[in-house]
Structure formats: structure tokens, C-alpha cells
Image (cartoon, rainbow, N blue to C red):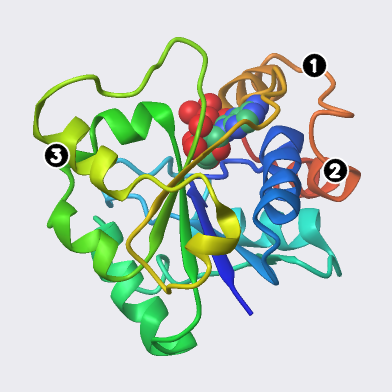
């Protein structure tokens, strides 16, 4: 048993997210991918889209999928949700023994040393880094050294421990973003085939992004 965590704003969730979540499940061979919408700080929240609505769209998109799951762990406490706090709570849920994978992009990896208690994160999980166009690994400095000391290319070896490694992978980036979906809706354009039909219907029924 092992679990991967995939956070985002999911405003709204789209096929780009669902594709990489599916590939992560396959590549990491985990039993569940927890997709976690983040809480917006109150002053930044787009008035018409609540955390609950973003969660409901995620639930509709995922349906009865065997591996992908919508998780409201970050919506249950006020923003900002520090990742290290989410990881602590997740460990309380899943116990200390199973491998936990935190999935981030290469862009996020480059800013990891600015995260709250960043050096504690490895105490709770492995970090899985997916490539992003235009971003490469940090080449020098403390962060680069930290990464090199924890890098592991062997998934089976990584899964021997519950936390503490860094694993790099390649995922398919579809040319879809939540921003482009919001813009299309506000321009009155069709968003079919960018996100599942159930999400398209929900956006229409709730009059989101208009
Ligand atoms: P926005 O356009 O509002 O910034 P977004 O489409 O980038 O949103 P997020 O919810 O911010 O969506 O993304 C969550 C995670 O999914 C991030 O790590 C992001 O890099 C990744 N992601 C977003 N879109 C894609 C895509 N088309 N293919 C692969 N990964 C994606």
C-alpha cells in the first residue's frame, strides 16, 4: 500500500490534471492518488467559486475511479495551507509505515527552499518531481546539494522506506489550463473535451466563470 498526493487549485479540474494523475498512478504503482484542492486565502478567492464547488467538480470528474480520489484535507483548514502541515495530517490518517509520495512540478522544485519548514518535508514523504517545459533542476547551492543527497532512480528501492527520497519522472502535459477554460466560459465558448462532461454540466448549472 502506498499513496501519492497531488495538490492544485483545480479551478476547474481538467483533462490535463486527470491525465497526469493517471500516469502518476501507473508510474508510481500506488493504490491511491489523493487530489487535494487548496484553500484560497479569503481575499484572493474568486467570489463565485468556493472550495466546496472546486471539490464537487473534482468528485464529478473522478467518479468511481479505482485509484484517483478527491481529498478535502486542505479545505478543512484556513489558507495558507502549508504543505508540511498537510503532510503531518496525512501521516496521522495513513500511519507512519506506508510510502507517501508528494507530487510536484520542476517549477515548484526550484522554489522548494522557500517553502515553510521545507527541510522537514522529507520526514513525511518522498518527493516526486515531474518535468515542466522551460524548467531544469537546480544546478548549484544548498537546494541542489540537498536534492542530490536524496535522489533515487529505483522505485522499488524507494518504496522500501516510507519517506525521504526524491524521484524524477516524465508526464504528458496536455495543452489545457484552468485559466483557458475560465476564459472560454466567460467568452461564451464551448469547453467540451477539455474537462469531463459532468464538469461541463456543473459549470453551466452553477453559472461559474461567466
Ligand atoms: P491555472 O490556469 O488556474 O493556473 P492550472 O490549469 O495550472 O490552473 P492547477 O490546479 O494550478 O491548474 O494545477 C495543479 C497542478 O497540475 C500543477 O502542478 C500544474 O503544473 C499541473 N497541471 C496543470 N495543467 C496541466 C496540464 N495541462 N498538464 C499537466 N499538468 C498540469
Which of the image's four quarters has the C terminus?
top right
Q: Earlier in the sequence, mark 3 or mark 1?
A: 3
Instruction: Name the secondary structure under disc 3.
Output: helix
Q: CA distance from mark 2 to mark 3?
A: 35 Å
Q: Nearer the viewer, mark 2 or mark 3?
A: 3
Which residue was labeled with disc 3? 114
Q: Earlier in the sequence, mark 2 or mark 3?
A: 3
Query: Seen from this angle, which residue lies furthest top?
Result: 134
Which residue was labeled with disc 2? 196
Q: Is residue 60 left or right of residue 120?
A: right
Q: Is residue 33 above or below residue 106?
A: below
Q: Residue at x 23, y 19 (%)?
A: 139
Which of the image's four quarters has the N terminus?
bottom right
- Image coordinates of residue 56 in percent, x first then y, are 67, 61
For label 1, being within 8 Å of ligand 1 is answered no
Q: Nearer the viewer, mark 2 or mark 1?
A: 2
Instruction: Name the secondary structure under disc 1.
Output: loop
* Mark 3 surroundings within 10 Å by alpha-carbon count, few (fewer than 14), some (14 through 19), many (20 or more): few
Which residue was labeled with disc 1? 189
Quarter of the rendered structure image containing ligand 1? top right
- Image coordinates of residue 62 in percent, x first then y, are 78, 59
Residue 147 occupies quadrant: top left
Q: Is residue 84 left or right of residue 6?
A: left
Name the disc covering residue 103, or none: none
Residue 146 versus residue 57: which sits nearer the camera?
Answer: 146
Residue 81 versus residue 45: which sits nearer the camera?
Answer: 81
Amino acid at each position: 500500500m502506498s499513496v501519492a498526493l497531488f495538490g492544485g487549485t483545480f479551478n476547474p479540474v481538467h483533462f490535463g490534471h486527470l491525465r497526469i494523475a493517471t500516469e502518476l498512478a501507473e508510474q508510481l504503482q500506488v493504490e491511491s492518488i489523493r487530489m487535494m484542492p487548496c484553500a484560497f486565502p479569503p481575499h484572493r478567492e474568486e467570489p463565485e467559486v468556493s472550495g466546496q464547488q472546486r471539490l464537487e467538480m473534482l468528485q464529478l470528474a473522478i467518479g468511481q475511479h479505482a485509484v484517483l480520489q478527491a481529498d478535502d484535507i486542505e479545505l478543512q483548514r484556513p489558507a495558507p495551507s502549508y504543505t508540511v502541515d498537510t503532510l503531518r495530517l496525512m501521516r496521522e490518517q495513513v500511519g507512519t509505515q506506508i510510502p507517501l509520495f508528494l507530487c510536484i512540478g520542476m517549477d515548484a522544485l526550484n522554489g522548494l527552499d522557500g517553502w515553510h519548514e521545507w527541510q522537514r518535508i522529507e520526514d513525511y514523504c518522498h518527493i516526486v518531481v515531474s518535468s515542466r517545459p522551460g524548467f531544469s533542476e537546480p544546478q548549484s547551492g544548498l537546494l541542489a546539494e540537498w536534492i542530490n543527497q536524496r535522489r533515487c532512480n529505483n522505485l522499488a528501492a524507494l518504496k522500501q522506506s516510507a519517506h525521504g527520497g526524491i524521484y524524477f519522472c516524465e508526464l504528458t502535459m496536455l495543452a489545457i489550463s484552468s485559466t483557458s477554460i475560465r476564459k472560454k466560459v466567460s467568452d461564451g465558448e464551448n469547453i467540451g473535451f477539455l474537462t469531463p462532461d459532468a464538469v461541463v454540466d456543473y459549470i453551466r448549472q452553477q453559472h461559474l466563470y461567466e
